[in-house]
Amino acid sequence: MMAPRHMQDGSTAVAEWLETVNLSDDPFAPRPISISVHLTNGKKEALVSLLREFRDVFAWSYEEMPGLNLNLVSHTLDIELGTKPDV
């Protein structure tokens, strides 16, 4: 199987250091997102403020995405019952 055409240009992925920010005000219902650690404090505050303002547009669970085909977003591993890892 070949990679999609837009990934066949020979470029390499760039790793980005991320930090997790909780967009929720409810400690029992976290809404974690990841943002770059390289943002200035001002840009980070502006971005987090914007994301909090519009957090209702994000789907935080599969239940919030009616009609989603679970065959596209989940996978299974067919492992024989009783199989143990080889360590």
Image: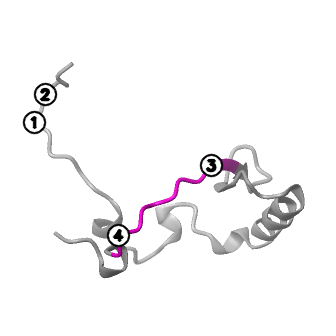
Is disc 1 in contact with disc 2, using a CB cutoff of under 8 Å?
yes
Cα gap from disc 1 to disc 3, whole angstroms:
38 Å
Label ID, residue 83: 2
Nearer to us in this view, 48 or 13:
13
Question: For the residue marked with disc 1, what is the amino acid?
Answer: Glu
Q: Earlier in the sequence, mark 4 or mark 2?
A: 4
Task: Mark 4: give few (<14), some (14-19) or many (20+) Cα within 10 Å.
Answer: few
Cα gap from disc 2 to disc 3, whole angstroms:
36 Å
Question: For the residue marked with disc 2, what is the amino acid?
Answer: Thr
Residue 40 on image: x %, y %: 84, 57
Residue 51 on image: x %, y %: 75, 67
Q: Which secondary structure, mark 2? A: loop
Residue 24 on image: x %, y %: 75, 55
Q: Earlier in the sequence, mark 2 or mark 3?
A: 3
Residue at 76% across / 50% down in the picture? 26
Residue linked to disc 3: 17
Which quadrant holds residue 55? bottom right
Residue linked to disc 1: 80
Mark 4, mark 2: which one is toward the viewer? 4
Name the residue furthest right: 42
Asked if the stretch drawn in magenta spans residue 19, the answer is yes
Q: Which residues are magenta?
A: 9-20
Left or right of 71 in this view: 17: right
Asked if the stretch drawn in magenta spans residue 54, the answer is no
Chief SS of the magenta region: loop
Nearer to us in this view, 2 or 76:
2
Name the residue furthest bottom: 5
Cα gap from disc 1 to disc 2, whole angstroms:
6 Å
